[in-house]
Image (cartoon, rainbow, N blue to C red):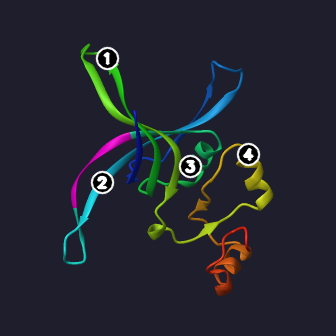
């Protein structure tokens, strides 16, 4: 297993399901999706050329799984942070061993160049949903931004400050 960071496009909308865990008597959300991770390089003429890539199954658990399934559409450009591993199984029809690349994601973020607008949940809801999980991604593609998010972006005096200083 290896640490993985890669950008790619969702081949499908994330599918959400709930799994009973063996370690405890709880049900946890899990989102599964296919992502094509490409390898693009500048072509020297202001564009890019594709130098190959690969498909991988991506899985994410918890509150982030529910958010991913709710807000990420097919085709979204995402950055995945997680662990890369080979998933191995035996084909039921042929009996042949099979394998595929798979990623257990710690986090999934949107490529900001493709985002039109965002809407943030009120702080209290974000804190409750993210309890125990840091860095939850905001929802994308909604109709309009909250006034507080807009005003925070438009204050030039905040440009060099950290979040703690604001």
2 or 1: tag closer to the N-terminus: 2
Check residue 65 in the rendering and tell me which mark sits there, or answer none. none
Tell me where residue 88 sits by quadrant: top left
Above or below: residue 119 compared with residue 55:
below
Q: Return the residue at label 3.
A: 68
Q: Are marks 2 and 1 in contact (CB under 8 Å)?
A: no
3 or 4: tag closer to the N-terminus: 3
4 or 1: tag closer to the N-terminus: 1
Q: Secondary structure at mark 3?
A: helix
Check residue 131 in the rendering and tell me which mark sits there, or answer none. 4
User: Which span is picked out in magenta?
Assistant: 50-56
**Left or right side of 87 for 142:** right
Q: Residue at x 41, y 56 (%)?
A: 75
Check residue 90 in the rendering and tell me which mark sits there, or answer none. 1
Q: Secondary structure at mark 2?
A: strand
Mark 2 or 1, closer to the camera: 2
């Amino acid at each position: 297993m290896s640490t993985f960071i890669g950008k790619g496009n969702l081949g499908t909308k994330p599918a959400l399901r709930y799994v009973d865990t063996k370690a405890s008597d709880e049900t946890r959300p899990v989102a599964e999706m296919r992502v094509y991770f490409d390898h693009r390089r500048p072509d020297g003429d202001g564009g890019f050329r594709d130098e190959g890539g690969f498909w991988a199954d991506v899985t994410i658990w918890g509150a982030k799984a529910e958010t991913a399934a709710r807000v990420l559409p097919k085709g979204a450009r995402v950055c995945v942070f997680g662990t890369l591993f080979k998933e191995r199984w035996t084909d039921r029809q042929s009996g042949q061993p099979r394998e595929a690349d798979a990623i257990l994601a710690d986090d999934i973020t949107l490529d900001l160049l493709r985002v039109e607008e965002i809407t943030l949940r009120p702080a209290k809801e974000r804190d409750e949903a993210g309890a125990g999980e840091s860095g939850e991604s905001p929802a994308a593609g909604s109709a309009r931004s909250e006034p507080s998010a807009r005003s925070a972006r438009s204050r030039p005096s905040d440009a060099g400050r950290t979040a703690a200083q604001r």
